[in-house]
Amino acid sequence: MQVPEIDRQTLLRRLHAGDNLEVVDIREANEYNDWHIAGASNLPTYIALNRRMYQPFIDQVQSYPKDRELVMVCRRGNTSKLAVLLAEQFGYKALSLQGGMADWSNAWSVAPVNPDGRSLHNSAATFLQIRRDGKGCLSYLLGAAGEAAIFDPNIEDAAYLELAAQAGLKIRWIFETHIHADHLSRAPSLLQKTGATLVMPAASSRRTAKPFQPIQDGETLRLGDIEIRAIATPGHTTESTCYLVNNEALISGDTLFVESIGRPDLEKGDAGAAQGAELLFDSLHQRLLPLPEAMQIFPAHYSGAINYDAAPLTARLGDLRAKISLLQAEKETFVKTVVAALPPKPPNHEMIISINEGKTPFDFSGGGMMSPADLEAGPNRCAVS
């Protein structure tokens, strides 16, 4: 029997459009609480349905209004099909999310940073925040004079190729702020398809032997009339670097978020957390916080639910100084608080790090033992709680 389904991008578009949908997550409460689609309700019957115990689902689903289309969500899009068939028996119009939460992890949208084309010191640059809504990862496309730079690519490379083509841009550079632990870098496949140059912090050479153009602290690259300057900010990782764009916008990687700061334990584990926190404190207070209050911060992750709109996730540095209490703490207090507040590590983080370092081969086509969707499934956990 054919079960009606909806793919991740169609669902995201319909949520952005405010369609009359009810997203129903049938996974158990612990999985739902750990990571779910923004606005989804929880009908925790996954185990019961897999045991062919249908009554708990039948009893609970009938509390939903029948004038809304239900989108059933599970781990990988299989059990949700059974939920759709059961809901249809009681007069509901329902859809199953293809690939479940594992596939939803790759849902993405675009938020123009300068929709009027007049930001970045009145440059006519293209500046896009590419939001991986399903996981909270953020990447950026910066374009000027017919060329583009991509920062921290983390979604399918076809998306970046499409966006660059729409803007009439050729991808020249691919920048990484650091070696990521919660998602696979899409730089390798983008490099193959574009002939672009991979730019990474010079200190990355201590962790990877893959070829890249090193960028030193304080070094500047230009893209048309756009200046991109590297600011070394070790702490989250030893090579972490932020990129200052025209002295107006800071692509901050995992060093500074709009709601918190980066965690310091993913590269060297628990044993290196305190030392990493000390480095992070120094980077924040010596390199970033002295920047102008009006500086716009553009991070690589967002921990909260991403709203269904086209507003970029950003904040003024001055507002973050006042908002994030850790930025006001003395060093000793900062280190102790950060180490004590570390959340669970991202799923599969050691394998992801090894792949991103170029030490473990990986088949991005999904032909290996694990697909990218399976390897990356779950919330991003790169921030201090």
Image (spheres, rainbow, N blue to C red):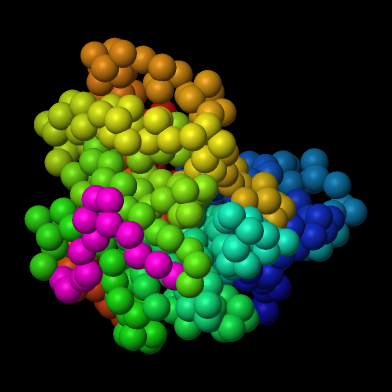
Residue 377: x %, y % from top left? 41, 56
Residue found at x 45% / y 19%? 325
Residue found at x 62% / y 67%? 124
| Foreground pick, 193 / 25 | 193
Residue 265: x %, y % from top left? 22, 37
Q: Is residue 178 visible?
A: no
Residue found at x 52% / y 71%? 143
- Tell me which corner region of the image, top left, top right, bottom left or bottom right, holds residue 234: top left
- Tell me which corner region of the image, top left, top right, bottom left or bottom right, holds residue 270: top left
Q: Which residues are magenta?
A: 210-223
Is residue 203 located in the magenta-colored stretch of the structure? no
Is residue 219 located in the magenta-colored stretch of the structure? yes
Residue 73: x %, y % from top left? 60, 56
| Foreground pick, 113 / 99 | 113
- Tell me which corner region of the image, top left, top right, bottom left or bottom right, holds residue 352: bottom left
- Residue 326's place in the image compared with 35, above or below, is above
**Apparent side of residue 152 relative to residue 67 in the rendered image (left or right):** left
- Residue 281's place in the image compared with 353, above or below, is above
Q: Is residue 312 visible?
A: yes
Residue 34: x %, y % from top left? 47, 39
| Foreground pick, 116 / 332 | 116
Residue found at x 28% / y 34%? 283
